[in-house]
Image (cartoon, rainbow, N blue to C red):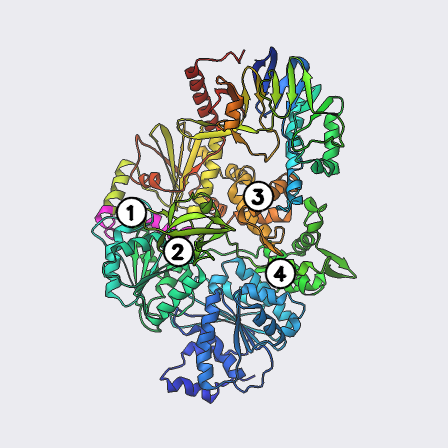
Amino acid sequence: MTPPKLPAKIEGWFSARGWDIHPHQRDMLARAHDPCTLLIAPTGGGKTMAGFLPTLAELADGNHEGLHTLYVSPLKALAADIKRNLRTPVDDIGLPIRIEDRTGDTSNTVKKRQRADPPHILLTTPESLALLTSYEDAPRIFAGLKRVIVDEIHALAESKRGDQLFLALARLQTLCPELRRVGLSATVDRPDDIASLLARHPDPCAIVTADPGPAPDIAMLQTEDAPPWSGGGAAYAIPAVLEQVKRHKTTLIFHNTRAQAEIFFHNLWLANDESLPIGIHHGSLDRTQRERVEAAMVRGDLRAIVCTGSLDLGIDWGDVDLVIQVGAPKNVKRLVQRIGRANHRYNAPSKAILVPANRWEVVECVTALQAVRENDLDGDPRGRGPQDVLCQHILLAAASAPFKADDLFTEMTSAGAFADLSRTEFDACLEFCATGGYAFRAYDRWQRLQERDGLWHLRDPRAAARIRMNAGTIQDSDTLKVRLKRNRGGKALGEVEEAFAASLSPGDTFLIGGRIVRYEGLREMTVEVSRNAARKPRIAVFSGTKFSTSTQLSQRTLRYLQQDDWPELPAHTADWLRLQRDMSRLPEPGRLLVETFPQDGRENMVVYGFAGRNAQQTLGLLLTKRMEDRDLAPMGFVSTDYATLIWGLDQVSDVESLFDLNALRDGLDGWLAGNALMKRTFRGAATIAGLIERNTPGTRKSGRQATFSSDILYDTLSKYDPDHLLMQVTREEALRGLVDFARIEDMLTRIEGRIDHSRTTHVTPLSAPLFLEVGKVPVQSGSAEERLLAEETEALMKDSGLFNIGK
Amino acid sequence: MNGLDFSLAGAGLTALGSGALWWADQRLLVVSDLHLGKTERILRRGGPSLPPYETRDTLIRLENDLATTGAATVICLGDSFDDVEAARTLPEADRLWINRLQAGRRWVWIEGNHDPGPVDLGGTHLAELPLPPLVFRHIAETGKSGEISGHYHPKVRVQTRLRSITRPAFLIDSDRVIMPAYGTYTGGLRSSEDVLDTLMRPEAAAIITGQTPRLVPMPR
């Protein structure tokens, strides 16, 4: 088949505007008939248009009936934005094309109509698509579908949302065998991995790479004041950042966490004497608030936006001319993508400034800058598709129509992420969906599927509604809405974590959306607040993810520390490193530095594992357990991306033997199994796989209820059915994510027992910031607790000087 | 045995780290507030649905204490079941388990506010049981002596030099013992609460449960 020619009226529209069609856009057009194509282009490279041009060309004659192209993006806002951006050329050119979006925000009436009468182009999200495929009339809805475009596929490919999407694509391919797939991605380290996820296994997938454009102009902010020893506030940099905002048209100020964004925004306004229009945008803010900020941004009304990963993707901010990253970039790839948000025009260099929030981050910023200049992107292979997502998909498939196990297995293994799924594993998932697994065989509510005449059916057809209500793989942590208190429900401000809300008493003040509010009370799952002008508010805890520094960036930093001197660093930071080298020693690649020293009546041990926050956290849990077994009375620990500090009652002398990999692995299976991180991992898997229903008709479980029940389910399974499918899923996930044991294994394999134990008489320079770090984890019910209790109760008894009750 | 000896009205008693009370002369073991079937009841009242495995956890611990002490008599001091319905609908496996524990022993169910009626399981049902010099009842009564009771799920908080520790505890004075709850997921009431403060004499002590039970003046 010859590649489609762009109809003259479309060509004409481009040339009338003096726009050239980019080479990669032509390339995508030439490949319009390929079954699968992946486009890699920098931000602002006209990616979306490249994806849609073939669709516009095919629909130009007005002969197509029903759905033609499905567009899937990770953000609802992006779907809405693309609708607007496509509408303009389509209307200008006068193309007979109906474009609609369908997301969680679409009204039920519209959704119903879309099922009966689908538009030519439907813009949606992975979750809405999964739901669409679960309806009985799915074959009719998707009849005639020719193309599917997956936008920002690099972001989706990193999460279970992507796994769910790729299973949905397999389903669509069964319904529409001629379906062609297109993926749009930012610059990534392993394009082949993404291509194999996108394509129907084992089909090939061509990769089109657009010109990456000129190298970005990036630097680290140098200030007269040294950054503080710890923390993420970067308050010291406020005047310098304001100065930069003044010098540029529009600045995006990225933060790693929502809480840090709030604090920074607050401080920025306290210093904003000229009242420059500056807004804030993050995922915990109420939707209408976010939309207002976005609209103001599009109009060019704002000089700066303080934001988080919520602005990492999508929406086109034409006039951004500077990106500031506050806090060390934990990941070079994400940094590059953020930098690309500036000068969102093809062939213009992006300008960015990194602002380290503390002394250690100065080092991390310098090494990240080097990595960006060398285009040394990081990323870990994601591994195979998780089985909890598979279970959910089986239930969704059953909600759509009875199925043959053989057919569904063939369909699912055509998704790249599940290509190596064995039949035994598939059958285990099917068994779980049907009965809940051995431990739950007596409970009727988990008996959901049954086989009749070779076809698997829902046992109770009414279950379809509940399955749909609980579809999706995004684990919203337990948040409560925050509203201004008024007679009839005041303005919605955003949401905070349930645990944070529980810690508030009336009169407490906290920061949200850049304003200080006073906690008034809790009403029907809503936190009611009033305006307040307190000077020192508490900081709301938001559910934003804390990313770990990537392996590649950590190793680069370790190598950097080996230099004889550090001319790239400001004097205050270079002096600090020199002092560490003199007093103790610096961590080295291929070795593990462990320091021990007494302080404040406790003994301390610092492990410089450079394994990232999550792995260092897990290492803290495992090591304290091993210390406990040796009666070293550990009391608690705190972790950062590069080190873990453990304190307790006794000095650790035989450090080396603590780090036996097999023993640590046993700890992961045995003791860590009871840990909250494992329980949280389990909870996610159990919710996705449908063991726990968050939503039931008419009610929504509060987070605490859900936690309570999932913790008991977990304890039950660990005791009575430790090989349950979901326990296997939980253990597999423990290697990554929150537990990240794989990085501990990596680290220990790399050092091969080369441990440098440095005993000093007091705190070392490099460990000092750890004492100021927040997020200390107490070790519960240990030998330390018994000893402290013995000490204290004896003293109390002596003081009381009474008692004939004992013998 | 991991216990702390004391005497009440001349009877030699041992507070076990598990929260059970042992009267060696009588070979008698007392446990209070088992709240068996708690999750089942929560489910019945529209709460989150959980399989009733917390019952098993409680029974495992009870079985251990029976094995270590070799008790001839067991007194369950009330609120043994989360409610009468929970007792009636106890899963067959748990029922059989309780029967097994009861075999060859005298077993007394004292009535509690959660389980006021008789339950359809082996053993004797009593509102209270006098065994001079002691008397066993669910809720402490003012002015009595030699009294062993439960009901309040007492716990105490101790501030040590490096951290504060909160655990279930026995409250004891020269008149009475108030026992901690033995059941899994049963929560607790601080010893400093008014009702406990009023019940206990000024010189009352607490025995903190755990690996090694420890005596302290009752925190007020």
Helix, strand or loop at label 4? It is: helix
Query: Mark 2 or 3 closer to N-term?
Result: 2
Q: Looking at the picture, which amino acid does disc 3 mark?
A: Phe
Residue at image position (47%, 29%) is B165
Question: Which residue carries the number 4 mark?
Answer: A468
Q: Are marks 4 and 3 in contact (CB under 8 Å)?
A: no
Viewer-closest of A343 and A26: A343
Residue A566 lies in the magenta-colored region: yes
Q: Which mark is residue A359?
A: 1
- Quarter of the image containing the N terminus of chain B? top right
Q: Are marks 4 and 2 in contact (CB under 8 Å)?
A: no
In this orientation, does residue A4 appear? yes
Q: Looking at the picture, which amino acid does disc 2 mark?
A: Asn
Q: Looking at the picture, which amino acid does disc 1 mark?
A: Arg
- Say how many tags the image has: 4
Helix, strand or loop at label 3? It is: helix
